[in-house]
Amino acid sequence: MSLATRIIAGAVGVAAAGATVAGVATTRRQAAAIHDRPGDPAAAPLGSLRSRGRTVVAEDGVPLHVEVDEVDPGMNDAGLPTVVFVHGYALNADCWHFQRAALRGRVRTVFYDQRSHGRSGRSGLANATIEQLGVDLRAIIEQVVPEGPVVLVGHSMGGMSVVALAAQYPELFGRAEDGGKVAGVCLISTTAGGLDPSRVLFPLVPARVGGGLAYGMVRGLARSHRAVDGIRRAGRTAAVVLTDRYSFGTEVPAGYVEFVDDMLSATPFEVLAEFFPSFRGMDMFDAVEAMNAVPTTIICGTRDRITSIGHSRKLHSRIPHSTLVECEGAGHMVIMERRAEVDAEIEKLITAAGSAAA
């Protein structure tokens, strides 16, 4: 076993030592049941909402899995834009369960798995970049929403994908008569640069050595990714504890934590390693100014341990006409933890974007 693999195994062991204490919190979470309305799609098992899949082929040939929820017959969606949801690092389109349920049948919505994630095809190493994700997003828009305005909703790396789109194709943002296609943007728990993901993947490494060690470790571990995936599976209990800590800021049902951990665990370490370097050098804050041309909402939890609230405040300062929503006490998975607040803001944005595009 390599030194890097031993370090990861040790980290799992340290985290496991806290599993007994965390069990008390888990019991409380299981008791904190969410009372959904009878027949509410949100009450369906997490990740079970589906529609017929289709494939969008990216410019480099990678197949992207896409699902579209159409408007129910008889519903009046005249003037409303199509909403495209873009998920984050190591997740998949299922993470939007509550937002999908809230809008289902009332607004045309598009969900897709980013390259190398979920049901989409694997990317080549050279194209495992944030910039490529922006190009992929343009392909989704062109092939799935050829007509009418679009609202983009991105969480975490998905928000970075939207920023990358703005950096490469700023002309897409604005009114249709000016050549625009994107009529509104919602950036959730994300940033346009300045992120040190080593503090996320290696929270047990001292800060003074975390950055450089983390990047060297990731490169080394990528060569033994199957062994690392085995360690992750073996340390599942500890992993759930860490998922809880880094995804949520307050108590949520245990099923939420397990659902997020299932998505994280299903993403091979090799994929994590391929995208990891792209975060460090990202600096696209100048690009977000293109979003001043459309209604833009920025949402973040004040206890986000991955993309801290400071990132959202900086985005807000660079997009002066944007709306900043700070969810007190919420963590990185604010789309689940504060779903009612997030859903309400997205609905307001859709209405504003529809009015602006009219």
Image (cartoon, rainbow, N blue to C red):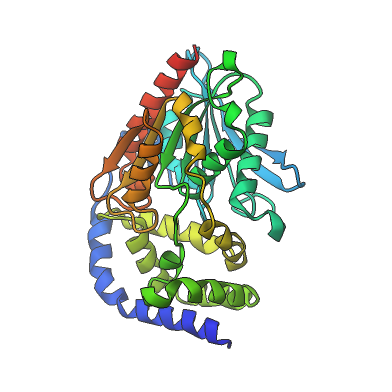
Which residue is nearer to you in this view: 101 or 357?
357
- Relative placement, left or right, of 337 versus 74 is left
Which residue is nearer to you in this view: 252 or 327?
327
In the image as oriented, which residue stretches furthest toward the right? 61
Q: Residue 242, position in %: x, y?
A: 37, 67
Q: Residue 344, position in %: x, y?
A: 33, 30
Residue at the image point whose x is 57% and y is 62% from the top: 277
Q: Residue 182, position in %: x, y?
A: 54, 26
Vertically, is 305 above or below 131?
A: below
Vertically, is 317 above or below 268?
A: above
In the image as oriented, which residue stretches furthest toward the front? 286
Vertically, is 194 above or below 24?
A: above
Q: Residue 24, position in %: x, y?
A: 23, 68
Residue at the image point whose x is 59% and y is 65% from the top: 268
Q: Quadrant of residue 11?
A: bottom left
Which residue is nearer to you in this view: 308 or 145?
308
Q: Quadrant of residue 21?
A: bottom left
